[in-house]
Amino acid sequence: MHPRGAEFFVIRAINDDSMVEGESERLDALTLQCHMRNMVSKIRTVCVYCGSGPGTNPRFVEAAISFGKLLAENGIRLVYGGGSIGLMGAVATSVLDHGGTVTGIIPDFLTSRENALTRVQEMIVTPDMHERKRLMFERSDAFVALPGGIGTLEELVEQLTWKQLGRHSKPVLLANIDGFWEPLLALVAHMREAEFIRPSLPVDILKAERVEEILPRLRAAVSRAPEGTEKLAPELARRL
């Protein structure tokens, strides 16, 4: 049993990077305060929602591989659904192949169906989907949706809903590869026109047409977020 009481277990884990020994001794109080603020606003982990299949368009897999490479090159840990197949496997394998780090979070009943990727540095097996989604939220600084199916859509919409209701301010971005997410964007526009999405409760969706645009847009969004609103307290996350 995890000390926090959650019924999940970690197969393998690595420690997060820590500050260089002695660095804090060389910083005065003001510099240290600024340093810590920058650490909070910096994107260190990105959760990727995507399909467990490759889709019919080869550009989907190409985008997953390219984004995995960019995450590794920028020292950003991938948090994802733990599978080794489809776009999930493509993005995670690419991160690993380029020297990056990966956390997979997968419910026990999917470990065989989605062929849990054993190469990852950290794999968390949860008892159910709800615990999986909560941990993916807690461990991520931003969310990116590559093309995928109903599961991808459900995870994406949940984060958009939590953000709409003011439960967090983490950026949520659609990787609109070859216009894959245009039907969803059209539906959101239709909801606005019908006033089911109102100005008092806006839906804030970032969009990138090219993989190279994803990280700059996430970083820009994080820099605009009000200080102290980027994290949702774990006790609140457990109640959502």
Image (spheres, helix red, strand yellow):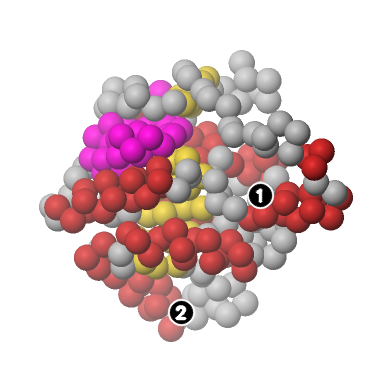
When the figure is inspected, residue 221 is found, relative to residue 32, above or below; the finding is: below
Query: Which image quadrant is residue 163 in?
Result: bottom right
Which of the 4 image quadrants contains residue 87?
top left
Q: Toward the viewer: 232 or 219?
A: 219
- The vertical placement of 101 against 27, above or below, is above
Q: Circle 2 — which element?
A: helix
Q: Nearer the viewer, mark 2 or mark 1?
A: 1
- Whichever of callouts 2 and 1 sits on the residue coming sooner in the sequence is 1
Residue 154 visible in the current orientation: no
Residue most extreme to the bottom? 193
Q: Is residue 182 visible?
A: yes
**Residue found 62% across the figure and 20% down from its top:** 2
Percent across and percent down for residue 181 are 30, 65
Q: Amino acid at mark 1?
A: Met
Q: Residue furthest front?
A: 26
Structural crowding at the residue carrying mark 1, measured as other residues with C-alpha within 10 Å and reported as few (<14), some (14–19) or many (≥20) = few
Residue 192 - label: 2
Rendered residue at 69%/58% (across/down)? 229
Q: Tell me if label 2 and label 1 are in contact, CB under 8 Å.
A: no
Asked whether 99 falls inside the magenta stretch, the response is yes
Between the residue at mark 2 and the residue at mark 1, the CA separation in whole angstroms equals 36 Å
Q: Amino acid at mark 2?
A: Arg
Label ID, residue 39: 1
The label on residue 120 is: none
Q: Secondary structure at mark 1?
A: helix
Q: Residue at x 21, y 51 (%)?
A: 62
Residue 69 is covered by the magenta coloring? no
**Viewer-side residue, 181 vs 236:** 181
x, y percentage for residue 55? 18, 50
Please provide the residue range marked out in magenta: 82-109
